[in-house]
Image (cartoon, helix red, strand yellow):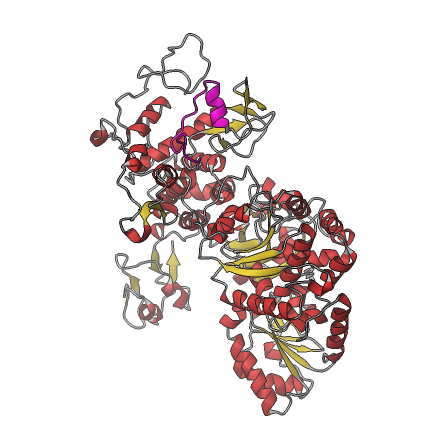
Amino acid sequence: MIELTIDGIKARVEEGTTVLEAAKSLGIIIPTLCYYPGLSTYGECRVCMVEVKGKKSSLEASCTMPVESGLEIITNSSRVKKARKLVVELLISSCPKSKKLQDLASMMAINKVRFRIKEKNCILCGRCIRYCKEQMQSGGIGFVGRGTARRVGTAFGAMPAECRHCGGCEWVCPVCELACNANNLVDGLCGGCQNLALVETCEICVKCSEAVGPRGHKAY
Amino acid sequence: MKRLKSVGELEKLRKKIISKSERGQKRIVTSAGTCGIARGAIEVAQAISKELRKKGLDREVSLKVTGCQGFCEIEPMVVIYPERILYQRVSAEDIPEIIAQSIMDNQLVERLLYTDPATGKKIAHEPDLTFFKKQTRHLLDSNRMIDPYNIDDYLALGGYSALAKALSRMKPKEIIDEVKNSGLRGRGGAGFPTGKKWESCRVAPSYDGIRYVICNADEGDPGAFMDRSVLEGNPHSIIEGMIIGAFAISSHTGYVYVRNEYPLAVQNLGIALDQARKYGLLGQNILGSGFDFDIHISRGGGAFICGESTALVASLEGKMGEPRPKHIHTVVQGLNGRPTNLNNVETWANVPLIINNGAKWYSKIGTEHSKGTKIFSLVGKINNTGLVEVPMGISLREIVYDIGGGIPNGKKFKAVQTGGPSGGCLPEKLLDLPVDFDRLSEVGSMMGSGGMIVMDEDTCMVDVAKYFIKFLTEESCGKCVPCREGLDRMLDLLTDITEGKARPGDVELLEELGTMIRETSLCALGRTSANPVLSTINYFRDEYDAHIKDKRCPARVCKGLITFSVIKENCNGCTRCAKVCPQAAVKGEKKKAHKINQELCIKCGLCRDACKFEAILVS
């Protein structure tokens, strides 16, 4: 068993557990996009970033980071929140119609998208690919291309013989669900449950990252 | 070629080769690395061969065609031994004169001698050139004496003696200690202590005992070609280093992952491996030691990201070249899940030096935390373009002015960019900075693999930042959001700035994006990708402000912000500019002042290059 500290709380978990899972066991929710329980971790979205006390050079993705004895993790420092906020802002600018992303934006009090909206409609999280390969044991889809030209595709653009039409790829996709105001976005944001006024709703703030509904919360 | 079955046989062969070689006899050496070939080195070599035969001299005078010797500015070069008379920028037509004057007679062909830009004097002998004198060419010097198609040349210089020593007189742990004590740090960019890496790989458990050694020859930094010339000109130095490393780590299979855009390097390495195998220096029971090891070449597919160690391993395995988080290091679980030791070309080439001369000798060169020499590719607005090998700790000023010969055309120095797309631009006030791993990182740049691009007053620093970000957006693997999307948006912002479409607050947004990309990216390409932008904002903020607030490019580079016009007083109507203009935008009668039509002008600058009366103004 490995002992580590997350947000000041001691956790005791088995070796091989990730920091994300260890935090979950303490009731600390770290927002994620490309993580899906049961599928292998990928570390693509960079939303689940956490700060490792003593490490100044960069943050770490909690979904891929294995626990280590004595580790001190902070999930909600201003450095972490700033980074997460900008990552989600970038994601919205490339995939604005997604309900999941608009919800994340409202939770993080993102009130402005400062980048050109380029509707790519995919965040390249790879959940569909991992679902097809690992859960359905098919592997009919995969990543194709590099950089901004990277997309999810099939071998030679043809319908894969392995596809059993299970629909799992669409089901597991975090951005397939359209935001309710998807066609009426204002500068990239749906404005449905906008967190424009920060209201303290919890009597004692334990500084979790959980959204507590449209009335907002203090954490971001 | 007979297979060598022991260290003793190797030494006997070496003695035989040395005694056979024509020492003291006249020899012509010309370099034909990729750079030389591009400038006609093959034609020069063929002309030499032809002329020697024509004059009946081909038995007494030998010709050696080597790889790149490092002074690319003056290629093709021809050096006459034993005096080492150096002729620069030689063409095939010059050869009969050279042979007549310097081989058949003892005269110099004055017009082909190198002129020192500082003194204006002509220098006849290669070792007297400041470019070479001020360097410490422990690695590169051999390139002038080796024909890469002949392993015997390498043997004549003492090649494979380090291997003989390691296999017959040292234990693996001793070898690792020697490399650790030398202080050698990886030359690929990260600067990780090599000995420590070897040790971790050796002790990492492998369920079937398989371990791999890899040479990272995917040199991708724009402007960097140090590894190319070692691969082309002295491939055996790398092979020897790898065999020693493999012996120390207990690995029996090695790979050289070389970028496919280096066809000559791939070819020369292949020939070298073949010849090493024929001599029994690779394969089973090397030199009778009982140690088996062989090396395979794997070619890259044209992705800069595959120079990153985890992406390289993925590519070697046949997967998409994308990095993975390094919580479990490659030395523990790398290629095919086995412990893998990956080092850069230059790192491997340093190993035989360390084994032959000892850690103590090696650690005397360099600074406290950066030992040894480093090869830099000095390019850009510099008089002496080429490869310079210098001890760590030398100042940037010495490299740029003493060895590099300063800035051409009397222009003023503006910045030097080190470390490729992961590095930063350093201004004049930092010229006295000693070059070593830590000092460069402290000021917002990094050593990287050794690229050094010199920039002058005509370089726009915003344009430079835009160039590097564009390179990175094209080369990013696209796996993680901050690098893929973040760099794309940084490019949008920088493009707007260079086109005069920027808004106030754009620089702050660039800084915010840059910091986030550094904090959240998955791999080192992403983490360091913001360096060119952040360092130029730090040291050249005034240029950004000029572009944004005044819609002006101070260096007069950004096409959207400059105008080409004719200075009436200087123009005498010679029509040269009108003739070269691709858009027919320059109009005027003969002998009368011309005029540029702004609607047609595409700011290509051909008119300015053609005008001999300085009548074209760029404002």
Q: Quadrant of residue B232?
A: bottom right
Q: Position of residue B537 (x, y in %)?
A: 48, 41
Q: Is residue B265 above or below residue A93?
A: below
Q: Is residue B214 visible?
A: yes
Quarter of the image with the N terminus of chain B in it: bottom right
Between residue B159 and residue B313, name the one nearer to us.
Answer: B313
The answer to whether residue B290 is magenta is no
Does residue A197 appear left or right of residue B31 in this picture? left
Main structural element of the magenta stretch: helix, strand or loop? loop
Between residue B389 and residue B198, name the one nearer to us.
Answer: B198
Between residue B496 and residue B3, name the one nearer to us.
Answer: B3
Residue range (magenta): A19-41
Q: Is residue B134 above or below residue B90?
A: above
Instruction: Work out which residue is located at the far top of the displayed protein and give it.
Output: A203
The answer to whether residue A35 is magenta is yes
Q: Position of residue B92 (x, y in %)?
A: 53, 81
Does residue B441 appear left or right of residue A77 in this picture? right
Q: Position of residue B617 (x, y in %)?
A: 38, 58
Does residue B331 appear left or right of residue B586 in this picture? right
Q: Position of residue B377 (x, y in %)?
A: 57, 58
